[in-house]
Amino acid sequence: MSQLARVKISALGTYVPPRVLSNADLEKMVETSNDWILERTGIRERHLADKGVASSDLAVEAAKRALAQRGIPATDLEVILIATVTPDMLFPSTACLVQHKLGANGAWGFDLSAACSAFLYALQTGAQYVATGMHKKVMVIGSDVMSSIIDYTDRATCVIFGDGAGAVILEPAEEDEVGLIDYVHEVDGSGAQSLYMPGGGSLHPSTRETVEKKMHYVHQDGQAVFKFAVRKQTELCEKLLKRNNLKGCDLDAFIPHQANRRIIMATADRLGLRPESLIINIDRYGNTTAGTIPLAMGTAIEEGKLKKGSLVMLASVGAGFTVGATLLRWAY
Ligand code: UT7
């Protein structure tokens, strides 16, 4: 834990593709309404990638912005970790594709699969490399093109998801007052079938039948995920706050995975957060899976809520189930 405190996020870059799919657009595609979507999820619009644009493309755009902010070339990167459930292909890893497109010739890397918690898991994985002294510049990217695995005739899922990416650079923190402080992660595989994509893996390799049965799309038991999300996200955040002698009201910014506005509000209520600390941008982007937390960090910066020393909690729940919470002090 003490080593992790010496690792900081030194830069952030985000990217969403320009095309917007509004609730009004969805009303023309499936039997739904702007009122239903807004009331049940908090989403107004989401950005979708054009055909042929993959997770690596979004990741590269986000990465370039993070590098530009930090003022370093891609060749300075030593490790690239990509959090995604929509890799360009099963192999090679999207990390390899991003390394090549960026010209990050000194970097090795790999993809990390943990659905909506993947960005937090990758963040902590990257932090270990920096904390041990093995590496000084690690890039962690959450990138998903969810539109590539969504059935746009299924109103229960197609209104929720969007495409987007965010990248951070991890480096040793020179000052003790800033950087990653602590984290809690949990998985509960008993929830595997509440949110999953059954086809295309070694269990159900792609066949005409898997396509006809729509097994290459996201399948979700929304209510089961909702209940688990509120309960577990709150539980992990409370645990993390308690063991660091903090209360919800001490946080300057609470940056949760953006899956549903009602999940975020329920968690915020239970944690006793100050309303101004809550970061919500689901209205603009929907659920971009591994992209939500870095995109929401970007929103927090836009809103002037992240300053050097700000106390921040990141939280996520996703398919698996996977759950995570990270505590840090913003470094710039
Ligand atoms: O990051 C991934 C993690 N995923 C999540 O966190 C998702 C968590 N779950 C949710 O966000 C919510 O469960 C949903 C937004 C997916 C669904 O909201 P809900 O309030 O749980 O709705 P429901 O599934 O209980 O459905 C209520 C009604 C149903 O109609 P009947 O059976 O009551 O007649 C649905 O068929 O709403 C209907 N419905 C819709 N109506 C209009 C479902 N989707 C839609 C829709 N438009 N898009």
Image (cartoon, rainbow, N blue to C red):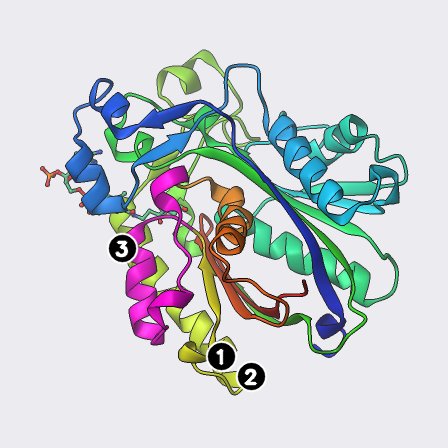
Q: Quickly name the residue at label 1.
A: 241
* Residue 279 within the segment the image draws in magenta: yes
Q: Position of residue 12 (x, y in %)?
A: 65, 49
Alpha carbon of mark 1 to alpha carbon of mark 3: how far?
Answer: 22 Å
Describe the element under mark 2 as helix, strand or loop.
loop
Mark 2 beta carbon near ligand 1 (under 8 Å): no
Residue 262: image tag? 3
> How would you rate the neighbour count of disc 3 (Cα within 10 Å): few for under 14, some for 14-19, many for 20 or more?
some
Looking at the rendered structure, the kind of residue marked 2 is Asn
Residue positioned 35% across, 24% down in the render: 151
Mark 3 beta carbon near ligand 1 (under 8 Å): yes
Q: Are marks 1 and 2 in contact (CB under 8 Å)?
A: yes
Residue positioned 21% across, 22% down in the render: 30
Quadrant containing ligand 1 reads top left
Residue 244: image tag? 2
Looking at the rendered structure, the kind of residue marked 1 is Leu
Q: Is residue 12 left or right of residue 281?
A: right
> How would you rate the neighbour count of disc 2 (Cα within 10 Å): few for under 14, some for 14-19, many for 20 or more?
few
Q: Quadrant of residue 15?
A: top right
Q: Quadrant of residue 113?
A: top right
Describe the element under mark 1 as helix, strand or loop.
helix
Q: Are marks 3 and 2 in contact (CB under 8 Å)?
A: no
